[in-house]
Image (cartoon, rainbow, N blue to C red):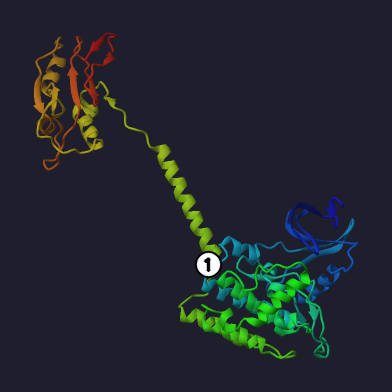
Amino acid sequence: MEDLIGGKYRIIKKLGSGSFGEIHLVRDVETNLEYAVKLESTKTKIPQLLYEVKLYKVLSGGTGVPNIHWYGQSGDNNCMVLDLLGKDLEDLFEYCKYKFSLRTVCMLAEQMLHRIEYLHSRSFIHRDIKPENFLFGIDKRHTLHLIDFGLGKMYRNIKTGEHVEMTTERSLIGTARYASINSHMGYEQSRRDDMCSIGYCLIYFLKGTLPWAGIKAKTKKEKYDLIKDKKLAISVEELCEGAPEQFIKYITYCQGLAFEEKPDYSFLRRLFREVMKQNKYRNNPESFDWVIRKSAAKKILTKRADQENSNICKIPASNTTVLPKKIFGKNSIENKIKSIVKREPLLKKKKSMGSSGVITSISTSKMKKCAKNNITGIPSTKTFKTSNLLKKNVNLRSRMKCNVSSTMIKTMVPSSGTKKSVLIDKAMNQPKLRKLNSGNKKVL
């Protein structure tokens, strides 16, 4: 394959593949915009891509219809460059653990019926309705798009409006799981068959499975026959068991349509609006299951990240806190004790006021006097209960109950008489060393 498709689209990565070929992500080298390109080998026996391009042009301008940006041959492939879309309904269904809420199913039904009505209004039927062919947009993330018209067919003459004739003994076209009973019986498909396929999709979304899902056989024909037999054997009531009665009405109505009959799309949409109204649901795109799920996951990740950041920012309190040497002014012992008390947890007073409940200290007035008169040596000390010291020297509010548990505050006047060293030892009141400005070491 050439480096650039159409002289301007560079392949970035593969997005998917199927019987038709492959889909790749491409980037316009001129605008840097991204698109999807559908590739089909030029050697394929039954080319479909050119036909699909023509059908896209017929549908151009409709809501939920991707735009075609380029078509042509590149190397050994026919290429169609179209709008890049988001996840298909099967991917979203898997993301939601294979179960959609009733509200989501009803909101999807509204958009699916609008898309198929527009296709039918342009004289074409899809013939391969399935969850994989409904995708939400990227720019229009809540708009459902219908794609893959390779099996589409004109059911009436565009000019005259004449409907195609009924034929029989036709082979099954489309995906067997969602194909109508008439398709299994070999009848020519018409609008009614697309409508039945949508009904099967909705039941699949609501219940998480279909009765004929998972059937295995040696050959494809045997498998298709077993699926057909299962669809014929099960009643509409059994198929819709547990679902609101409107789902039974939908399936019954679609299966009762005549070959050339135009479906009443408005009536079918009203059925699901009734369900929404009965359950007091609002048709809000932000209420889609995957949107809610992603939002919840984002909140969990954000909360977890905040907790991790909070844990990183937490610094364990040290067992030993050394207060600045300055005694007077803003950094006085009184103010420092205030800050310590505010940080320390308030503990219940012990009955026994041992070493943990006594503070050995020098009164502030004596320390000021010693410093002023340059008195050397250690003046006599007095022992106060914690509550008394806090009342005298800290001037806390009378109602505050304080108890510096397991804390001894010792003060000493060095020989210079100009500085004081204060050490708070919360652990075992073990002796500590601290260098004073004079360079001498004093044992507290």
According to the picture, the residue beneath numbered tag 1 turns out to be 286
Q: Which residue is more in the foreground, 108 or 379?
A: 108
- Can residue 114 be spotted in the picture? no
Indicate left or right for 109 with 437 as reference: right
**Residue 391 coordinates in the image, percent (x, y):** 11, 34
**Residue 281 coordinates in the image, percent (x, y):** 48, 76
- Residue at 76% x, 76% y is 59
- Residue at 51% x, 63% y is 292
**Residue 110 coordinates in the image, percent (x, y):** 60, 78
Q: Quadrant of residue 21?
A: bottom right
Q: Amino acid at mark 1?
A: Glu
Q: Which residue is more in the foreground, 302 or 8?
A: 302
Indicate left or right for 402 with 248 as reference: left
Badge 1 density bin: few <14, some 14–19, many ≥20, Cα 10 Å: few
- Residue at 87% x, 68% y is 47
Q: How many marks?
A: 1
Indicate left or right for 144 with 162 as reference: left
Q: Quadrant of residue 352?
A: top left
**Residue 241 coordinates in the image, percent (x, y):** 54, 79
**Whether residue 395 is situated above or below residue 141 in the rendered picture:** above
Q: Which residue is more in the foreground, 298 or 382?
A: 298
Q: Say what secondary structure mark 1 lies in.
A: helix
- Can residue 83 be spotted in the picture? yes
Q: Point out the image quarter for the C terminus.
A: top left
**Whether residue 193 is situated above or below residue 364 in the rendered picture:** below
Q: Quadrant of residue 323?
A: top left
Indicate left or right for 268 with 74 as reference: left
